[in-house]
Image (cartoon, helix red, strand yellow):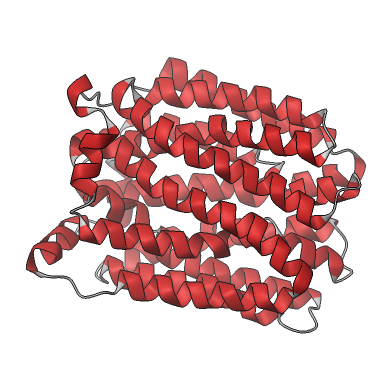
Amino acid sequence: MPPFTATIRQLPRPFWVLIGATFVNRFGVFVWPFLTLYMTRNGNTPAQAGWAVSAYSVGAFGAAWIGGWLADRMGRNVTMALSALGSAACMMALSQSSDWRILSALSFLTGLVAEAGSPASSALVQDMVPVELHVTAFAVWRFAINLGWSLGPMVAGMLAEHSFFWLFAVDAMTSAFFGIIAWIWLPRGRKTEAHRAGWRVAWQSIRVNKPFLALFAACLCCSWSFRQTSTTFMLHLKESGHSMSWSGIILAVNGIMICIMEMPLTAVSHRIASRTMIALGFLLMGAAYLVLIGPSPLWMFVLCVVVFTLGEMFAFSRQPAYAAGLAPEDMRGRYSGFISFAWAIGGIVGSAGGLQLYGVSPAAVWIVSAVLGAIAALLILMPLDSDQMKDEKNAH
């Protein structure tokens, strides 16, 4: 296997255009980490905020359905552009609302529009990059995402102390920038013929793809833990008496660790089976919240983020490429969309259920996260038969 730096140099130029635009877009994800705080500051209860956040995930569920089909039928760049430009408009509408019912409706619309581009982005990476470079490409893609995430929340946290409006405005501007770049500079990607582009055809393939279904179920479990980072974790930080300005800094630890460590980790762990890395990662992502049981000084929140981030690096450095290896070439958009279903469903339950449960017992939220992380790991490590082992080897 060539050195990791050599494989990076083999990545095509259009891929780097996507990376640059993705960084700008992710830097500007200002609103969602602070939406719960925005709503409670405007007189809504944590439970009402949970409905608005979960409404976004309901929209994201529909986006996975629509976005997966659009990516395969209309093209990757068109889908990404329409999604990003629509997201910018939704952000400005959200900035003018305060009632939880209106915010819930707008959150649903935002999730439906903004997340429709996710399957197209993943599918375009698969289209542009040779199969043998998929792990490297997705590692670089995640580096760009998390570099933006590491810098963005720090700026957002400072802006939130003065005016929440600028969180929405900057989020909208960076989304619009991404949409323009996608429309003009990114390739269309693979296009599927109409008779092969429907979800019924894709489902006939997915329902017999047992490794892929196991991955779907594991992502469904893990999505609960992932959603808590922007809901109950943020609320617990505030309820524990810590300044809101620390929220952005603590969340930035996640992005900084990933930027510094994930690509070297990918390089040194390439011989370890993908399923092993993903399972260990999902386990750690759930178990990280156990440190918040009981009194929660500031360093406990940092420790939680560190452990969670280690798990995220183990799992997410491999999960996109692993899923891509299990997908037929002409169904990449819909397979990516189907994985998005898992994260959307888990986001719905994790947002509303997590905040509702938090109102009863914060410790119960952290215990549920750990249990679901363990179940996700077991699902990934389920024994495979000979045909499934062949598929898994190809995905690795």
Residue 228, image x, y percentages: 64, 62
In terms of depth relative to the viewer, which is nearer, 38 or 136?
Answer: 38
Residue 299, image x, y percentages: 75, 76
Q: Is residue 264 above or below residue 50?
A: below
Residue at point 36% right, 45% down? 338
* Residue 366 visible (yes or no): yes
Residue at point 51% right, 31% down? 21
Q: Is residue 320 above or below residue 246?
A: above
Residue 181, image x, y percentages: 50, 21
* Residue 396 visible (yes or no): no
Point out the image quarter for the N terminus: bottom left
Residue at point 37% right, 61% down? 217
Point out the image quarter for the C terminus: bottom left
In terms of depth relative to the viewer, which is nearer, 194 or 11?
Answer: 194
Residue at point 70% right, 68% down? 357
Answer with left or right where residue 242 lies relative to residue 209: right
Direction top: furthest residue: 184
In terms of depth relative to the viewer, which is nearer, 379 or 105?
Answer: 105
